[in-house]
Structure formats: C-alpha cells, structure tokens
C-alpha cells in the first residue's frame, strides 16, 4: 500500500540501499504504519491525523513514510544478530545486507525530529512487523552505546497511536493483557526514546454492536487528544 501522496517523495518502505540523510534544516517527521487493515484501519486514520497536525504546525516540514505491513522488515535472524558483533571487515554478504538494513532504519529515526507510529494490538501484542522494526533499531554502537548503558537517539518525540478491541484498564476482565504499550516503552528506552500514547477502541464487531457508543466516544476522545499534541509542543 502506498503512503499518503504528500509522503511518497520521501518513501523508504522497501528495504534497499541506505537512504541519504537529508541535509535540510527544516523539521522532519518519520511516519510509520503497521496495520494490516488497509483503508479500514483505525490506526492508519489516526496516525494520518497526527501527521496532518504536525504539518500544520511545521510549515515547510518534510515527512518520510514507512509502511511495515506493505513491506515488513525481516525478523532478526542469525546473520543480523552476528552482524552486530562480527567486525565489519569480516562481514559475509549476508552480514553486510543485514547491517545495511539496520543502519537504514536507524538512519530514518536519526533524521527525524519526531516519529509517529500506528500501533494496532493483535492478539494482545504489537504486530510482528513492529517487533522486527524495533529489533533492527536496537543496535550496539549505532543506536545505543556498546555497553548498552545509554541510548543514542534521544531528543526525538515519539507519538504512538494505539487501537485495541476493548479496554484493558484496571477493573476490566482483561486488565494487563495489553502487552504492546509496556513493551514499546521498555524497548525504546534502550535507544533513548520515550513514546507517548494515544489509545482508542478499534471498530466494533457485529457481535459487540451494543458497545458502539463507547467506541465512538473513545474515538472522539482520541481525536481531541491528537489535535492538542502539537499545540502543546508550540506553547
């Protein structure tokens, strides 16, 4: 699936040669989607709303779009793991390819002043494409110090838009079953990033039609929260 028209010029959705780092001093945002629901996706619609708000607050800003569902990065395998510890002059072709992809993905974050991530909840966890993307981002010597003591990607704002099939709040039958937000918070802290979450309820299935009013109220609250994000940043 192609990214928004205004983002295609910066698109780096498919793994390949490293994208040159932009030299402009204009604000730059990385927009990442991961939903497999296409145009039906709640997180895609809400992440676009976040990006539209950022563009309105940052005239002249640029956006790089990566669609993890359309072009998922490979999961961390033996070659990608070994590429972190084998000296570069001893890399096999497979090591070099894996290293180049991790460097590309980290470079996209390094080039951004802000990151917007659409994060649906699948089977109580993040999409596997998001897990793979983050695994490539955690790289000793590139995104975190060699001794893993300090992240190197600090100073960037991360907005994660979450859509879930129901509530996992305290007091609900499935309290604590959301394993996406806590995981993302912990793993991104390794590279020096702290995500901010905007959560809502996904589309209600016919069998749960009686919950539609709550879903609509949740969506309205998410819209309101999103519309205030960049206003707070400018204040």
Image: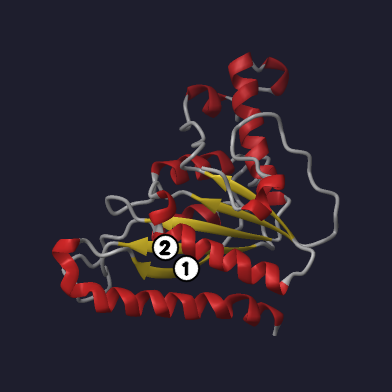
Q: Are marks 2 and 1 in contact (CB under 8 Å)?
A: yes
Q: So how many labels did they put on this image?
A: 2
Q: Position of residue 37 (x, y in %)?
A: 38, 50
Q: In the rendering, which numbered label is found on residue 162? A: 2
Label 2 or label 1, whichever comes before in sequence order: 2
Q: In the rendering, which numbered label is found on residue 212? A: none
Say which of marks 2 and 1 sits in front.
2
Taking the image as shown, residue 89 lies to the left or right of residue 68, namely right
Is any atom of residue 197 visible in this view?
A: yes
Q: Residues within 10 Å of mark 2 (few under 14, many from 20)?
A: many
Q: Residue at x 20, y 73 (%)?
A: 211
Q: Is residue 20 above or below residue 111?
A: above
Q: Nearer the viewer, residue 37 or 169?
A: 37
Quarter holding residue 232: bottom right
Question: Which residue was labeled with disc 1?
Answer: 197
Q: Is residue 180 above or below residue 129?
A: below
Taking the image as shown, residue 182 lies to the left or right of residue 30, namely left
Secondary structure at badge 1 equals strand
Q: Position of residue 168 (x, y in %)?
A: 26, 68
Is any atom of residue 86 visible in this view?
A: no
Q: Residue at x 27, y 62 (%)?
A: 165
Secondary structure at badge 2 equals strand
Q: Nearer the viewer, residue 52 or 124?
A: 52
Q: Position of residue 222 (x, y in %)?
A: 44, 75
Quarter holding residue 63: bottom right
Taking the image as shown, residue 201 lies to the left or right of residue 136, namely left
Dividing the image into 4 quarters, which one contains the C terminus?
Answer: bottom right
Q: Position of residue 100 (x, y in %)?
A: 66, 29
Q: Is residue 134 above or below residue 74?
A: below
Residue positioned most to the bottom: 235
């Amino acid at each position: 699936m192609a990214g928004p028209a205004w983002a295609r010029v910066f698109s780096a959705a498919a793994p390949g040669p490293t994208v040159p780092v932009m030299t402009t001093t204009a604000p730059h945002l990385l927009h990442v989607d991961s939903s497999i629901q296409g145009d039906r996706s709640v997180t895609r619609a809400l992440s676009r709303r976040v990006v539209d708000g950022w563009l309105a607050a940052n005239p002249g800003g640029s956006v790089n779009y990566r669609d993890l569902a359309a072009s998922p990065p490979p999961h961390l395998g033996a070659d990608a793991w070994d590429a972190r510890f084998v000296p570069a002059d001893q890399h096999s072709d497979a090591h070099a390819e894996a290293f180049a992809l991790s460097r590309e993905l980290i470079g996209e974050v390094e080039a951004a002043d802000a990151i917007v991530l659409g994060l649906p909840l699948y089977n109580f966890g993040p999409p596997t494409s998001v897990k793979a993307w983050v695994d490539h981002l955690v790289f000793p010597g590139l995104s975190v110090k060699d001794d893993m003591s300090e992240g190197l990607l600090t100073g960037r704002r991360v907005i994660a838009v979450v859509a879930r099939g129901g509530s996992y709040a305290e007091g609900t039958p499935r309290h604590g079953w959301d394993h996406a937000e806590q995981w993302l918070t912990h793993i991104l802290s390794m590279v020096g990033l702290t995500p901010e979450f905007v959560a809502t309820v996904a589309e209600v299935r016919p069998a749960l039609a009686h919950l539609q009013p709550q879903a609509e109220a949740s969506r309205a609250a998410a819209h309101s929260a999103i519309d205030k994000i960049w206003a707070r940043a400018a204040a």
